[in-house]
Image (cartoon, coloured by chain):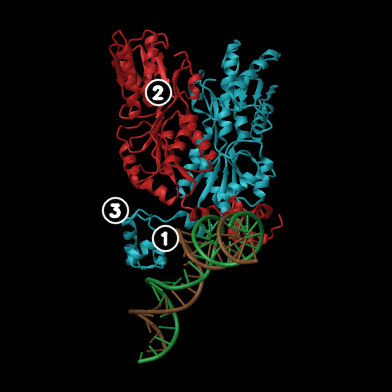
Chain colours: A cyan, B red, C brown, D green
Amino acid sequence: MADADKRAKTMADIARLANVSKPTVSRALSNSPLVNAETRDHVLSVAAEHGYAVNRNAQKLRHKRTNTIAVSLDFRSHRENHISDPFMFDLLAGVSEALGDRNQDLLLCAPNHNDVVSFRQILNERGADGFIVLGQGHREEMLKEFAATAAPVVVWGAAADDANYCVVGSDNLLGGQLAGRYFLGKGRRRFLFVGDISFRELRLRREGLQRAADASEDEVVVDDITLHSFSYEAAYDAANRYLDVVENRPDALFAYNDTAAMAFISAFREAGIDVPGDVSVVGYNDIPSAQFFSPPITTIRQDTHQAGHLLVAKLMRIIDGDTPKSTQIRTELILRES
Amino acid sequence: MADADKRAKTMADIARLANVSKPTVSRALSNSPLVNAETRDHVLSVAAEHGYAVNRNAQKLRHKRTNTIAVSLDFRSHRENHISDPFMFDLLAGVSEALGDRNQDLLLCAPNHNDVVSFRQILNERGADGFIVLGQGHREEMLKEFAATAAPVVVWGAAADDANYCVVGSDNLLGGQLAGRYFLGKGRRRFLFVGDISFRELRLRREGLQRAADASEDEVVVDDITLHSFSYEAAYDAANRYLDVVENRPDALFAYNDTAAMAFISAFREAGIDVPGDVSVVGYNDIPSAQFFSPPITTIRQDTHQAGHLLVAKLMRIIDGDTPKSTQIRTELILRES
DNA sequence: AAAAAGATTGAAATGCATTTCAATCGAGGG
DNA sequence: CCCTCGATTGAAATGCATTTCAATCTTTTT
């Protein structure tokens, strides 16, 4: 408190004030056994008294490690998505917590371009040790190239068989199977899958649904609607166009996320189709509004907390030179009224 | 691509490869007029060829500025809030975009403790130029102390008259007035405000509601329910307890956010009270589920995009030594069915 | 043609913390 | 009593980019 001088204190200042040398201060602060206990306590008290804090940039420059992890989040798709999907926010919260536990800084990035150069630049220029990529996208090839530049990276999503990078994601196949079994249990036999299967995650959900259908003794058909936008409106429009042309209406609908499920339910009801009377519906992600929608939506929930911790744990191992395997997180069906 | 050497290139490497000195490389990269155009192009091409990127840490060390802004976000209250309020996510998206535009890095922080030391530490140790505080809280005193340490900080919320720091926030007073006038227009005369007025923002919303009531020619009463938790359940329970004891039921309800509005509507309906027949309801924030709730909720929307840009613009001015005034953002009533 | 002004460039210093390596001191061994 | 070892400490080097200041080379001015 007795600091008239405005300039921030440096380690040299503390050294002078404590009558020791810079290396001793450095060692005291890092709790090195190379410094006498008394000396260390003295230095620490002087440092505290003057409110000294190490200059992280100098520290990062000297160490080759920055203890900073870049997290890329595609806010644009969030905005586009009229009814925002809070799922990514939960994931971000999980990652933030996990990084905090490990004393790592979180650099939040919204890359302008989805190319290797942009990603590589973030790592190099912004000075991050590793990269966590959240948010789906058609980026498998790009990420493969990126990982090939020896970039420590972990991705949220679904792993390709030949992926050269580590992926943490939902058990999409199981998610689809859970939905399918739920439908079968309700006596449903005409499934409809809504989603763009050019995304691997969604293709797997579709595949899980199919497997459940194939496992049934009765004949079960699975129809598809491909959506090319993530917005509520796009889903709503697609639902209406579908209702105009469809011959045999489905009695079960599995949507790639809760937003799309809501859009379809609204369109169905307006067309006089009852949910859950005529059609059973299952969504994905268990976003908060799912439980307050009318009817409350049966959906697939993922453990975002676990996801955040896994993403971080794996990335740290990669940075340390290890090559951890991809993993899928806990995935469960939340039974509600749809 | 012809780099067998794994070690990242330094500026000295590029200087040698381009047959110039380090200062020339530095100037070429920063587009300084102090370097000949031809020389600059040559250096740039050599740098690009070898995939060189400046070491941001060395750069930050040398400049006194880090071009990094710390953003604190209280994920805990987000988790507590059972139905998550995507509002903060929107705000974060706005801030992220605005920082990106200005080429500033975004360091996302979830401070463990709400004390000056923790906040100061983030600024000093993490090496950020300034601080954006998102998320409400009882922190006015702490932030005052924090700002008094000459910390460049901008806060999302409501400004106290004697605040020594810059605040950007909703026009809460107007928000309350809009709700009140909406009720009056529907012939409502018994208002109920739901929220904890120990938070300045909510106190102002309550005050706006009161002013609208006072401006009416008829007699209008305003009742209060104070919630001490932000969760959906807490609001739902409070609604039921209220219904047990209340003598004269309200005919208009203004809730501090959309989640609480939903909880009250659910409780009211279960008690046989019709919304909007018996009671008109206005929420706050216009979260996505507000429009899909049954009935779709009339609510107060804030321009989060503008908010993000304002927060950043003001912070940059503070860092440059200016002292911008606090501001309120656009606030409007979204008419729906409640 | 000499002098002054301007354009380019580089050597060395700087920012701050960490690390290497050598120096010092007292203790235990022979 | 001399020597070696361990403990403790500090001087100097290091990491990388930027900045100051002086040096060199061109032009322009008179």
Going 48% across and 49% down the picture, which residue do you hit? B66
A286 above or below D8? above
Q: Quadrant of residue A221?
A: top right
Q: Residues within 10 Å of mark 1 (few under 14, many from 20)?
A: few
Q: Residues within 10 Å of mark 3 (few under 14, many from 20)?
A: few
Q: Kindly identify which chain the residue marked by label 1 belongs to.
A: A
Q: Quadrant of residue B230?
A: top left
Going 35% across and 28% down the picture, which residue do you hit? B201
> Label 1 to label 3, Cα distance in Å?
24 Å
Residue B10 visible: no
Look at mark 1 in the image and give the residue it sits on. A30
Q: Can you give x and y, in whole percent of width and height, for residue A73 in the image?
A: 56, 38
Look at mark 3 in the image and give the residue it sits on. A1
Going 47% across and 15% down the picture, which residue do you hit? B335
> Label 3 to label 2, Cα distance in Å?
45 Å
Residue B105 visible: yes
- Amino acid type for the residue under numbered disc 2: Ala
Q: Mark number for residue B169?
A: none
Q: Are marks 1 and 3 in contact (CB under 8 Å)?
A: no
Query: Which element type, helix, strand or loop, lies under badge 1?
Result: loop
Look at mark 2 in the image and give the residue it sits on. B260
- Amino acid type for the residue under numbered disc 3: Met
Query: Which element type, helix, strand or loop, lies under badge 2?
Result: helix
- Amino acid type for the residue under numbered disc 1: Ser
B62 above or below D3? above
Q: How many numbered discs sit on the rendered protein? A: 3
> Label 1 to label 2, Cα distance in Å?
48 Å
Q: Can you give x and y, in whole percent of width and height, for residue A163 in the image?
A: 67, 45
Give the label, 1 or 3, closer to the camera. Answer: 3
Query: Which element type, helix, strand or loop, lies under badge 3?
Result: loop
Give the label, 3 or 2, closer to the camera. Answer: 3
